[in-house]
Image (cartoon, rainbow, N blue to C red):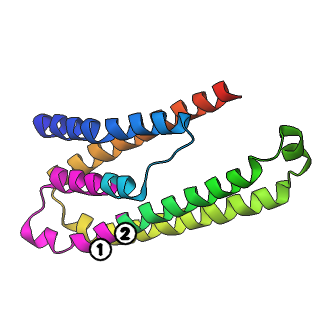
Amino acid sequence: MLKLTAAVATALFVTASPLAYAQTATTAQSDHPSAAELKKLTDLRIDLVKAALQMTPDQTKLWPPVENAIRARAEGRQARLAKIRETMGKRAEESRSEVLENRDPIAFMQRRAEALSQRSADLNKLAEAWQPLYKTLSPEQRKRMAALAIFVFHDMSDAIERRRAEAEEDE
């Protein structure tokens, strides 16, 4: 178990590190990862989960809906980020005082609620897709899945904190 967890953690570091570097470098250039790069990252994440689970042939039959839900969720996230970039691009021409004067907190709350609703729907679809497969996982597979989830959530929270710190530095 410890060896597998270490292997999964190493694989995640290896696959996530280039993206983290790319995000840092591209953020400074106001550039964003291409659709192909984001697709590759999604593919790597899917491969990582599959490798960590070490599914049986019967379990593998239940995998396609999970993979489709993971991909759909990633595409939804990309679409939301593209919409944010579009909005930010429109506002880039405005000065800070113009942005503050033209701020509509009600519209902001409505856009945020819509985005959260979409994220919620995507997450529910992912949970529904996982449920049949999860029921068939052995206790050992469930432990590996839990360890991977904890590691990914920890890594995500670190990335969020880095972005917040960078945003504060930019201001």
The reply, left or right, for residue 26 in relation to residue 106 is left
Dot 2: few (<14), some (14–19), or many (≥20) neighbours within 10 Å? many
**Above/below status of 55 relative to 140:** below
From the image, tell me which residue sits under label 2.
69
Residue extending farthest left:
57
At numbered mark 2, what does the secondary structure look like: helix, strand or loop?
A: helix
Mark 2 → mark 1, Cα distance in angstroms: 6 Å
The reply, left or right, for residue 23 in relation to residue 130 is right
From the image, tell me which residue sits under label 1.
65
Q: Is residue 157 visible?
A: no
Q: Residue at x 69, y 58 (%)?
A: 112
**Above/below status of 40 relative to 56:** above
What x and y, as percent, mark residue 39? 35, 58
The reply, left or right, for residue 71 in relation to residue 159 is left
Q: Dividing the image into 4 quarters, which one contains the C terminus?
A: top right
Q: Amino acid at mark 1?
A: Pro
Q: Residue at x 29, y 67 (%)?
A: 67
Q: Amino acid at mark 2?
A: Ala
Give the magenta part as a residue range.
Answer: 42-70
Residue extending farthest right:
101
Q: Tell whether position 22 is magenta.
A: no
2 and 1 marks in contact (CB < 8 Å): yes
At numbered mark 1, what does the secondary structure look like: helix, strand or loop?
A: helix
Q: Residue at x 84, y 46 (%)?
A: 99
Question: Residue 134: which quarter of the image?
Answer: bottom left
**Where residue 88 is drawn, which disc sits there?**
none
